[in-house]
Image (cartoon, grey):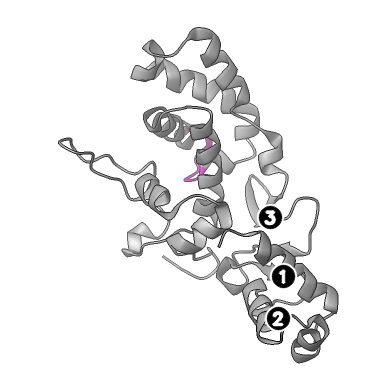
Amino acid sequence: MQLTGIGLYTFPEAARLTGIASAQLRRWLIGYRPSSSSRKPPIWETDLAAENLEGLSFFDLLEVRLVRHFRNLGISLQTIRLASKHAKELFHSSHPFICQQFLTDGKSIFAEAFEASDENNLIDLRHKQFVINQVVRPSLYSGLEYDGDQPQRWFPMEKIKSVVLDPKIAFGKPIVMGTGLRTQALFDAWLAENEDYRRVSLLYEVPVSAVRSAVRFEQKLPA
């Protein structure tokens, strides 16, 4: 596999960017073995798994955000796996939850997954209908920039396009728009320079606003 242009994130990096615990990400994307039970498979194989690398691609990173949303609705991993499998076949995509088509077909996909899973017999009908109606949240896609059916860039700061994750630049790490510089680098320099925005802007030859954007973004991330 060509590793350039797909984004590369370690589990700790992905945890910071998504707010999902690293251990949880590993359970979802590597699988786990409950006590006295058979191993539970991952929800999907990451784009890096074929290279025997641990971590996430840009598409993996975006899709786990949706998985967290589904889990917060109380949907089991079994049902999510079934929905993912069905959606992959329907959309011909390895990452179906972030396809634009999922915005229109997501509810029906999860309705079918509920019917096919053991969960269907355990969940109240009224609650199930509520959950299905909440599966697709357009706000979850609001920071994504699409080219065709798949997202190409992610602007993680709500209504602000000063910071972007683009898998074709800096291995998908957050950068300040128009500079190509990683937010982490500018933030670290700001700390090293006693939080002097102007000094960092001179050192890196970027506007003060770029430094401010990097600092604001990094400070919002979990420690």
Neighbourhood count class around disc 2 (C-alpha, 10 Å): few under 14, some 14–19, many 20 upward: many
Instruction: Say whether residue 152 is left or right of residue 1.
Output: right
| Whether residue 178 is visible | no
At which x and y percent is residue 223?
A: 55, 62
Q: Residue at x 56, y 50 (%)?
A: 62
Labelled pair 1, 2 in contact (Cβ < 8 Å): yes
Upstream in sequence: badge 3 or badge 1: 3
Toward which corner of the image does residue 215 lie, by quadrant? bottom right
Residue wearing tag 1 = 215
Label 3: state its secondary structure.
loop
Q: CA distance from mark 1 to mark 2?
A: 8 Å
Residue indicated by mark 2: 190
Range drawn in magenta: 90-95
**Which tag, 1 or 2, sits closer to the chain's start?**
2
Q: Residue at x 47, y 45 (%)?
A: 94
| Residue drawn at x 77%, y 76% as measured from the top left | 211
Residue of label 3: 156
